[in-house]
């Protein structure tokens, strides 16, 4: 396994203005742009753990940059640069902290929707289907099993909760929120982005079971923002493990969720400690998917 750096759990940039601190990312204003710094923090069941997964933030940042470049012909995105050493406002002593885990971005007005695309039946969608035969109100054929392919892929949007869980909403509700024209355009973009990502990942031996995108508006145009097709926003499965009725291995933080699910913990703060072995295994999963998709070592 690649030797990973010590986890970065927080980032403070005195030369920039922090405007938001999320579960994983710190967002700063730098001149007319934004800087996203992706830490190694990890959350599970909407609770941020006290420990970090070494190198996780670098994986997420590099993969987002990789996909932003690969999909820009489909949809413009907010990425400007991932090279902090070229940003004149950044003092040299911060280059090491920001290297690999920071992205300078154009500002955009976020749309208040999580654009979730599902290409396989799993997770909450699988639970919905078992109960109703539908996923977020979208009717599916009878007789599907876990990991069955959903063709064509479906959009199951949800609200963007500041805290707690996102809530599924209908496409009609999305149209009411942001307007039917923008809603239709973004739905088409989300499905096209998923197909591009899925087809590429499949050529590297993986499938993307589901993913979520975020979009914003800039100068009246739709732009892809936040992260893109990362192990935190997507479910990656080895293609040779995928078949109806199977439960493929997930290359993301599933190892952490599985460990926590076996504890006597009510899934509210404070979180229990994570053993080094669990953190190491999670780091290996993140590193493997990065290297498989990009062909580059971490």
Image (cartoon, helix red, strand yellow):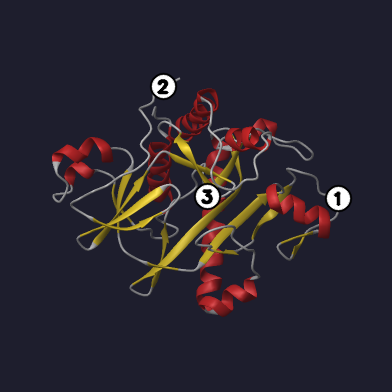
Element class at badge 3: helix
- Quadrant of residue 72 within the rendered picture: bottom left
Residue 285 or residue 224, whichever sits in front:
285
Marks 1 and 3, how far apart in space? 28 Å
Mark earlier in primary sequence (2, 1) = 2
Q: Return the residue at label 3.
A: 196
Residue 225 percent across, percent down from the top left: 41, 58
Q: Nearer the viewer, mark 2 or mark 1?
A: 2
Marks 3 and 2, how far apart in space? 28 Å
Q: Nearer the viewer, mark 1 or mark 3?
A: 1
183 over 213 or under it: above or below: below
Residue 216 or residue 151, whichever sits in front:
216
For label 2, the crowd category at 10 Å Cα-Cα, with few meaning under 14, some 14 to 19 and many 20 or more, is few
Q: Tell me if 80 is positioned left or right of 116 in this view.
A: left
- Quadrant of residue 152 within the rendered picture: bottom right
User: Which image quarter is the C terminus in?
Assistant: top left
Q: Tell me if 90 is positioned left or right of 209 in this view.
A: left
Q: Nearer the viewer, mark 3 or mark 2?
A: 2
Q: Tell me if 47 is positioned left or right of 109 in this view.
A: right
At x 17% / y 47%, what residue is drawn? 90
At x 35% / y 27%, what residue is drawn? 5
Q: Do labels 3 and 2 touch, CB within 8 Å? A: no
Mark earlier in primary sequence (1, 3) = 1
Give the label on residue 143, or none: 1
Residue 62 percent across, percent down from the top left: 38, 40
Residue 88 or residue 277, whichever sits in front:
277
Q: Return the residue at label 2.
A: 2
Mark earlier in primary sequence (3, 2) = 2
């Amino acid at each position: 396994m690649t030797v990973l750096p010590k986890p970065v759990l927080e980032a403070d940039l005195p030369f920039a203005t922090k405007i938001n601190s999320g579960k994983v990312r710190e967002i700063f204003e730098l001149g007319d742009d934004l800087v996203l710094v992706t830490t190694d923090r990890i959350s599970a069941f909407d609770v941020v753990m006290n420990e970090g997964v070494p190198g996780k933030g670098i994986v997420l940042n590099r993969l987002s940059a990789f996909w932003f470049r690969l999909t820009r012909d489909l949809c413009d995105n907010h990425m400007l640069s991932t090279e902090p050493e070229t940003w004149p406002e950044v003092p040299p002593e911060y280059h090491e902290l920001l290297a690999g885990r920071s992205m300078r971005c154009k500002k955009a007005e976020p749309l208040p929707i999580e654009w979730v695309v599902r290409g396989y039946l799993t997770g909450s969608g699988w639970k919905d289907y078992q109960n109703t035969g539908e996923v977020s109100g979208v009717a599916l054929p009878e007789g599907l099993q876990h990991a069955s392919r959903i063709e064509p892929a479906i959009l199951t949007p949800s609200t963007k909760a500041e805290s707690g869980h996102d809530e599924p909403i209908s496409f009609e509700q999305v149209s009411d929120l942001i307007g039917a024209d923008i809603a239709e355009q973004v739905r088409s973009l989300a499905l096209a982005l998923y197909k591009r990502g899925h087809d590429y990942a499949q050529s590297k031996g993986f499938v993307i079971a589901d993913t979520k995108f975020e979009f914003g508006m800039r100068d009246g145009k739709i732009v892809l923002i936040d992260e893109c097709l990362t192990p935190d926003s997507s479910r990656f499965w080895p293609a040779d493990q995928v078949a109806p009725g199977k439960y493929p291995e997930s290359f993301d933080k599933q190892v952490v969720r599985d460990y926590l699910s076996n504890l006597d913990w009510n899934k509210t703060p404070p979180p229990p400690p994570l053993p080094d072995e669990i953190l190491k295994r999670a780091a290996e999963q993140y590193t493997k998917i990065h290297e498989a998709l990009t062909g580059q070592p971490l």
